């Protein structure tokens, strides 16, 4: 399910529109991940708090969204572009890949919340595909 | 049986009170058919689904969106007996309609995104958690009679 040229353009365009709110969306998305899927907190047991809205969760959500934005810039070759991030996730973080889908869903929910008019079904499918491709690239070095 | 706290029940009722089934039902089903095009396989008799515009303008899609969302709302009046409430519908979806139960989850994800668009930040994280728990319970009940 690779992205068409039109869908790549749609992704870049929407992420451009989103850029002033990207920190907020990233922070909210991770907060929602731990709220809606509490088992994901297992990856953050070393933090002071992993509850929704807490400072470490919001900060890390911003970090993750920064990574997603970086990936938008590498949309033409995500596998090569995300090689070192894949190694990090594979050998150090060892996040079960099922969680990438869960976080993607939370990101889509936040995008819809913040940009209800712009997050059309066409934007939705393009961004959903992009996040799925991103997750695949992150999994590249897992085994 | 699914256990619900009083707070969860309140959140779920609050969200349902914000949902206009005649608006959100069609929007959710249209979005599902566009974002996950393989779901169109179940709607061969619905006429033109060949473009996004055709899907959005299709009256059978809109009508069925209302039917599906009305069905999803049924659980609200039977929160302590969701499994039994959907037993007949589960048999229908399995034996007559032959719907892969994973599609229930896809439609529910699209519904959550439509609801999020309507409610904005008023859909707080703990409310989203209760809402998705509700949808998971219904999805599970709908899949229960498959064999």
Image (cartoon, rainbow, N blue to C red):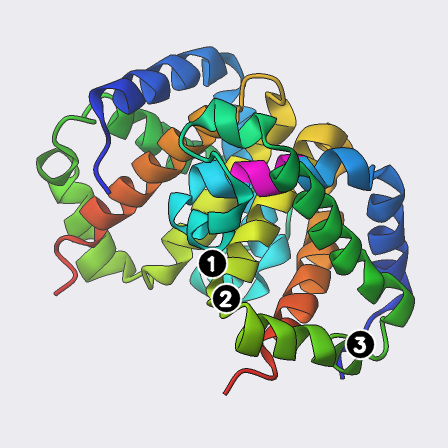
Label 1: chain? A
Label 2: chain? B
Give the residue displayed 79% in from the left and 53% down from the top. Answer: B70
Q: Position of residue A17 (x, y in %)?
A: 46, 11
Give the residue displayed 89% in from the left and 43% down from the top. Answer: B17
- Closer to viewer: mark 3 or mark 2: 2
Residue at the spot of label 2: B99
Quadrant of residue A79 within the rendered picture: top left
The secondary element bearing badge 2 is classed as loop
The secondary element bearing badge 1 is classed as helix
Instruction: Inspect the magenta stretch and tell me whether residue B141 lies in it.
Output: no
Work out whether disc 3 and disc 1 sit on a shared chain: no
Q: From the viewer's perspective, is B40 left or right of A70?
A: right
Towards the viewer: B55 or A127:
B55
Which quarter of the image is occupied by the N terminus of chain A? top left
Residue at the spot of label 1: A44
Q: From the viewer's perspective, is A72 left or right of B145?
A: left
């Amino acid at each position: 399910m690779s992205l068409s040229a039109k869908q790549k353009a749609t992704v870049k365009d929407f992420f451009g529109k989103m850029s002033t709110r990207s920190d907020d969306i990233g922070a909210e998305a991770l907060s929602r991940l731990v709220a809606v899927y509490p088992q994901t907190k297992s990856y953050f047991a070393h933090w002071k708090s992993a509850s929704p809205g807490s400072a470490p969760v919001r900060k890390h959500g911003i970090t993750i969204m920064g990574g997603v934005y970086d990936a938008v810039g590498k949309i033409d070759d995500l596998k090569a572009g995300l090689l070192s991030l894949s190694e990090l996730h594979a050998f150090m973080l060892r996040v079960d890949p099922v969680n990438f889908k869960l976080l993607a869903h939370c990101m889509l929910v936040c995008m819809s919340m913040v940009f209800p008019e712009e997050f059309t079904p066409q934007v939705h499918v393009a961004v959903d595909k992009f996040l799925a491709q991103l997750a695949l690239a992150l999994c590249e070095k897992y085994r | 049986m699914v256990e619900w706290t009083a707070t969860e029940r309140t959140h779920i009722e609050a969200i349902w009170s914000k949902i206009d089934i005649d608006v959100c039902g069609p929007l959710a089903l249209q979005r599902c058919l566009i974002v996950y095009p393989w779901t169109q396989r179940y709607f061969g008799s619905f006429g033109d689904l060949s473009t996004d515009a055709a899907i959005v303008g299709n009256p059978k899609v809109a009508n069925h969106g209302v039917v599906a969302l009305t069905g999803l709302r049924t659980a609200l009046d039977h929160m302590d007996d969701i499994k039994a409430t959907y037993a007949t519908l589960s048999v229908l979806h399995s034996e007559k309609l032959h719907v892969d139960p994973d599609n229930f989850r896809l439609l529910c994800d699209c519904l959550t995104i439509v609801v999020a668009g309507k409610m904005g930040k008023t859909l707080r994280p703990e409310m989203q958690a209760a809402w998705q728990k509700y949808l998971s319970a219904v999805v599970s009940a709908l899949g229960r009679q498959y064999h």
